Amino acid sequence: MSDHRDLLHRLFKDAELLAVISQEMSFTRAAGRLGLQQSAVSHRVRALEEVVGAPLFERTTRRLDLTATGSVLCSAATRSLEVFEAALRELEDLQRSRSLRLSVSSSLAMKWLLPRLAQAEAAGLELVLDVDDAVSDLRSGSAQAAVRFGVGPYPGLHSVRLDTAELIPVARPGFLNAPLSQEMCVPGGCAFLADRRAAADGTEFDWQSYFRARGWQEAEPEIAATFDRTDLVLQAAISGMGVALGRTLLVEDDLAAGFLVEVGERVKSRAGYWLVATSELAQTQGFQALSRWLKSQMKRS
């Protein structure tokens, strides 16, 4: 078995030499292609023949022919090089590829990312969205990267902070006659809309976190309706059902269109937006291009 491993090691080492000789059918021309002396090529072939235990080439003064053993080994050497060359091309394509499957929450997809996909394509990015409010497993799932809202960073993953965030109370134009105040945060004072998932995911994107940031420790708002997605909360606010807590990226387009107005002071959130991926994917040109594009789009927003 030891001799077998030694032979495999020697064949791997001399695979390129055998492939080139079989293509050129000349030690001299093979030596020129490989940048070797002709004597060095002859020496390596003789040494390999000794290890194999049979001649690989029939040498005459005018020509070089393959023996049966040489034909088998040179053919295998050529195929092995073709396999590695194909693998290298695949690796280069992987490094250069700008096609990525990106995991995003439904709210971020609907309220911010989807309207900008055409701009991503214009920037040379091919994004396939995995819309899921659950945290995607980037090591075994279909998504290659994810945009997450949270405090971060994320252990075991490459994390790039894309942008900070602010919490922004919003409502339909004319819903409130005065800016949101602590006095309104009592039963019967104002109808508030809540996001059940956001209140429980540890991101501090909830009314109690907003009230603490404003110093309203005694606030006890009346919750008119509760939803499982922020985009639904914002749509309910647009419909005039109450005051919603929005955040950076999720409300800018609706504010610009006049569907919503700010009804209270903005407060800074400890959480922000992060682009996360495996360390391997983070080294690719596609991931780096995606990171630059997301940062530029968020800055514009």
Image (tube, grey):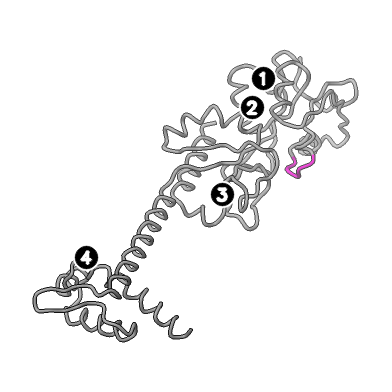
Q: Foreground residue, 271 or 94? A: 94
Dividing the picture into quadrants, the one containing residue 10 is bottom left
Q: Is residue 251 visible?
A: yes
Query: How far is mark 3 from mark 1, CA to CA?
Result: 30 Å
Q: Which is nearer the N-term, disc 4 or disc 2?
A: 4
Judge depth for marks 1 and 4 and give the one in front. 4
Q: Amino acid at mark 1?
A: Leu
Residue kind at label 4, given as amino acid type? Gln
Residue under label 3: 160
Q: Which residue is mark 1?
A: 260
Magenta stretch: dominant SS? loop
Residue visible at 35% across and 59% down? 85
Q: Amino acid at mark 2?
A: Val
Report, in whole angstroms, how far the alpha carbon at label 1 lies from the one at label 4.
72 Å
**Quadrant in which residue 32 is drawn:** bottom left
The part of the chain drawn in magenta is: 200-204
- Marks 1/4 in contact by CB < 8 Å: the verdict is no
Among the 4 quarters of the image, the one containing residue 172: top right
Query: Between disc 2 and disc 1, whose residue precedes?
Result: 2
